[in-house]
Amino acid sequence: MSSDAPRGVFITFEGGEGAGKSTQIARLAAALRTASGREVVTTREPGGTPRAEGYRAALLRGVAKPFGPFAEALMFAAARIDHVDALIRPALARGAIVLCDRFADSTRAYQGAAGGLDPALIVSLERVTLQGLRPDLTLILDLPAEAGLARARRRGGEGADRFEAEALSFHERLRSAFLAIAAAEPARCRVIDASPGPEAVEAAIRAAVASHRPDLLPGETGDRDHAA
Ligand code: Z5A
């Protein structure tokens, strides 16, 4: 990439089940395309490339569960390596805005905090998997675990998987884990209250993005401009 090539923007969405990530990624992508005129790529994990989507199907069926959280984390990492190399890095090199539904913070929360995997192993795995790639902004959609599970159950479909089947306490640990990640990395992460209706959540997300990168949503007021 030459030094005057446009620089991409990498935004990830994280949170528990049914938090509204897919809904909000579609809305933010539409807003960014209109407002910035830039290429916007939406993708997800596990998945995003044909090879990684193959891993997704196996992971959501629970194929890796009997091997324990480390083996499961390795399988998520294998899918992520292909996703990063084949889709995310090339899109960022073109100057695109990449919106990704879950990324490495999900490994920290699901296999780490909730699954019991040693955080030191996760740090090592991130180092070799990501090779320095970090999201510019991570939006953590937060709502009580029970409310998110109820939304996911109402939606049905592929989501009724290996992770939804975990106990409520697992999902409560996940929520705490995502909030702890946000507290540890405030420059990268913004917590969004995902409890209100989709329009209110969308407005909060747009304000967070405008605050972080005013050039992406010109004319919008960032949420920090409203801070007391
Ligand atoms: N996982 C992992 O363990 N380790 C890793 O490293 C990675 C992932 C990367 C992927 O499953 C699973 O992989 C995930 C973690 C694990 N666990 N699970 N399950 P997935 O992609 O199928 O599931 P998900 O990421 O949790 O997404 P989801 O369940 O599809 O939820 P969502 O995308 O956040 O929500 P949604 O589909 O936009 O909305 C859910 C329903 O609520 C739907 O009917 C909406 O119309 C409705 N909705 C949305 N917003 C609202 C509001 N604001 N109010 C009311 N209703 C709403």
Image (tube, grey):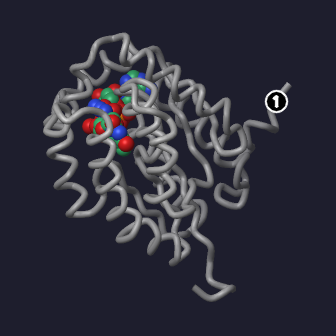
The answer to whether residue 143 is above or below residue 2 is above
Q: Quadrant location of ligand 1? A: top left
The answer to whether residue 108 is above or below residue 12 is above
Q: Residue at x 61, y 43 (%)?
A: 206
Tell which of 69 and 207 is nearer to you: 69
- Quadrant for the C terminus, please: top right
The answer to whether residue 86 is above or below residue 143 is below
User: Where is residue 24 shown, x and y percent of the image?
Assistant: 45, 40
Residue 53, quarter of picture: bottom left
Q: Residue at x 62, y 88 (%)?
A: 2
Tell which of 161 and 6 is nearer to you: 161
Residue 222, quarter of picture: top right
Q: Residue furthest right?
A: 228
- Quadrant for the N terminus, please: bottom right
For the image, the number of numbered tags is 1
Indicate if the residue with disc 1 has its beta carbon within 8 Å of ligand 1. Answer: no
Q: Residue at x 72, y 43 (%)?
A: 187
User: Where is residue 91 shown, x and y percent of the image?
Assistant: 46, 71
Q: Residue at x 15, y 45 (%)?
A: 58
The answer to whether residue 88 is above or below residue 47 is below
Give the structural element (helix, strand or loop) at label 1. Answer: loop
Tell which of 142 and 151 is nearer to you: 142
Amino acid of disc 1: Ala
Instruction: From the viewer's perspective, tell me whether residue 122 is left or right of residue 69.
Output: right
Q: Which residue is mark 1?
A: 227
User: Where is residue 177 shown, x and y percent of the image?
Assistant: 51, 25
Few, some or many C-alpha atoms within 10 Å of disc 1 (few <14, some 14-19, many ≥20)?
A: few
